[in-house]
Every structure is written in structure tokens, then in C-alpha cells.
Image (spheres, rainbow, N blue to C red):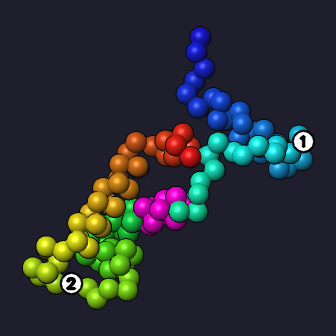
Amino acid sequence: MPAAPGTALRLVSTRIYAGLIGFAPPIKERAPYHLTSYRQHRLIQLLTLLDAHAAGLALRQIAFALVFPRNQPLTGAAWKGSGERRHTHRLLGEAQRMCREGYRTLLEKG
């Protein structure tokens, strides 16, 4: 019978946790889900976008409050054709895909 998906990851995580709380010798190896500082920042940004979208903020509000906080908000046709709008839309789509596909993929990609 094959092991359930993520079994190896759960075993390593359990060993690391046991080492942290003193039930086992500490593990010196790097955790399989270690994220770079850039990736951490990116994931935090995506989760923040999801939260803002779930709170009912419009795409324009999300763009100029979270993604481009130093830019002046655009209005009308300037907003419709802007790169800021397209970029924010892509980020929100990525965040929604991440939410739909499950956070376990983060651990696998680490």
C-alpha cells in the first residue's frame, strides 16, 4: 500500500517539532519547506490580497492600498488601461489559485 501524500513531509515536520520542544535531538538538516525571504514576502502579499478581496475591497482599492501604496490612485480610462490594474488582477488570480489548489503545494514547492 503506497504512503499517503505528504507522509514524508509530516514525518520530517514531526521530527523537527520534537527536536524543538526537547523530546528528540535537534535536527540540523534544513526543513523541506524552507522559504526564501522573497517567497515569504510574496506569499504574505498574496494572502493579504485574498483577505482584502474577501473583505469586499474593489480591485482599485486593493491596488493602491496594498500593491502600489506609493502611487497616486488612477481613475476612469487611465485605470482601465493601466499596468497597475493588470498586475493587481494577475496577483489576485494567483492568490485565488493558491487558495483553491491548497496550501500543501507550498510545502511541496518550498
Query: Which segment did they paint magenta?
Result: 39-48
Mark carried by residue 74: 2
SS for dot 1? loop
Q: Residue at x 38, y 56 (%)?
A: 95
Residue 103 vertical position relative to residue 54 in the rendered view, above or below = above
Magenta segment's dominant SS is helix
Q: Residue at x 40, y 42 (%)?
A: 101
Q: Residues within 10 Å of mark 2 (few under 14, many from 20)?
A: some
Instruction: Give the x, y percent position of residue 106.
Output: 51, 46
Residue 23 visible in the snapshot? no
Nearest the viewer among 51 and 65 is 65
Whether 44 is among the magenta residues is yes
Pick whichever of labels 1 and 2 is earlier in the sequence.
1
Residue 39 visible in the snapshot? yes
Q: Amino acid at mark 2?
A: Leu
Q: Residue furthest top?
A: 1
Residue 48 placement: quadrant:
bottom left
Q: Amino acid at mark 1?
A: Pro
Nearest the viewer among 50 and 54 is 50
Q: Residue at x 32, y 80 (%)?
A: 64
Nearest the viewer among 25 and 61 is 25
Whether 18 is among the magenta residues is no
Name the residue that disc number 1 marks. 25
Residue 83 placement: quadrant:
bottom left
